[in-house]
Image (cartoon, helix red, strand yellow):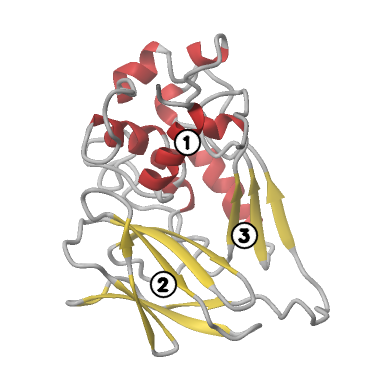
Amino acid sequence: MLSRRTFARGFALALGTGTLQRGSLLDPRAAFAQPPQQSGWEAGKLFHVLPMVSHERILLKCSLNEPMAQSPELIIHGRRNVGRRTDSRGLYWTFDLPGLRPDTEYQVELRSEAGFLAEPWKLKTFPDPDSEAEHVRIVFYTCAGGHDALLPNNTCQSLEVRQALIKRALSFQPHAMVANGDQVYWDLFAPRISKQYGNSEAAIAYAGRFDKTKPIFGTTNEEFLLKTGAEQIAPLYRTMCRSVPVFFVQDDHDYYDMTKPAMR
């Protein structure tokens, strides 16, 4: 039997805080072809990117508008890191680059064999843990999830409203952002609230059902997780946070249930 923890683990692997599929409600080639971006910077083939940093390491997850057969590379300060694919088609990639200098602004380049996938951008590591920072500004927020396919039958805000809130938070030029839980609302197990979310007629019509008898990658389960999970994250952030580290904390709804599973 598939436990909720196993389900959540598979969701995280498949999602990779990933991107969308052709024909979906939030397809970037359709209604949201012109997402919120900072002026003067070209996203190219990069659909969304979410970085995390420490004082000596950069972890970056992204998705592309087109699948890639060859792994893209992340180049920082002359060092090359080959991307690790996190889906079955080559749209979702993750990069992990340790051994960096503290409190240092790096130029980030995302490339394929054909050249740049996006215009290079800046990303700074955190100060050394033993140093004393003069000031720090961190944005904390919660319950950023929501899906327009389920409106207006739940209390989540539309993608347009949530994008405006993220953009407003970034206007304060934070050093980092902390998304404190509930990145996803598509509850399947909670007896009452699931009728508004994952077990509603609208949800089933849009994404179908999760099949516990199948693996995740390369099956309808992967499509289910991308539609119900990735589409609540990737179109919201797009590339707005490319230079601002974002730390995601999981809470009950992120496990597709209001009841948090035992972490064992």
Q: Earlier in the sequence, mark 1 or mark 2?
A: 1
Of marks 1 and 3, the one in the foreground: 1
Q: Amino acid at mark 1?
A: Ala
Residue 19 point in image, percent of width and height: 35, 48
Provide the secondary structure element on which disc 2 rests: loop
The answer for how far apart the CA atoms under marks 1 and 2 are is 35 Å
**Horizontal side, residue 145 vs residue 111: left or right:** right
Residue type, mark 2 in image: Trp
Residue 170 circle label: 3
- As drawn, 86 above or below 111: above
Q: Give x and y (percent) for residue 32.
A: 35, 45
In front here: 4 or 91?
4
Crowding around mark 3 (Cα neighbors within 10 Å: few <14, some 14 to 19, many 20+) is: some
The x and y percentages for residue 26 are 34, 38
3 shown above or below 24: above
Check disc 3 and give the amino acid type.
Leu
- Residue 133 visible to an observer of this rendering: yes
Which quadrant, please, contains the C terminus? top right
Q: Residue at x 64, y 83 (%)?
A: 102
Q: Earlier in the sequence, mark 1 or mark 3?
A: 1
Q: Earlier in the sequence, mark 2 or mark 3?
A: 2
Cα gap from disc 2 to disc 3, whole angstroms = 16 Å
Image quarter where the N terminus lies is top left
Q: At 59% from the left edge and 86% from the top edge, which residue is drawn?
A: 101
Nearest to the observer: residue 30 or residue 262: 262
Disc 2: which residue: 41
Side (left or right) of 78 relative to 21: right
Query: Residue at 35% of width from left, 66% of height from top?
Result: 43
Q: CA distance from mark 1 to mark 3?
A: 29 Å
Q: Nearer the viewer, mark 1 or mark 2?
A: 1
Q: Which mark is residue 8?
A: 1
* Quadrant in the rendering for residue 65: bottom left
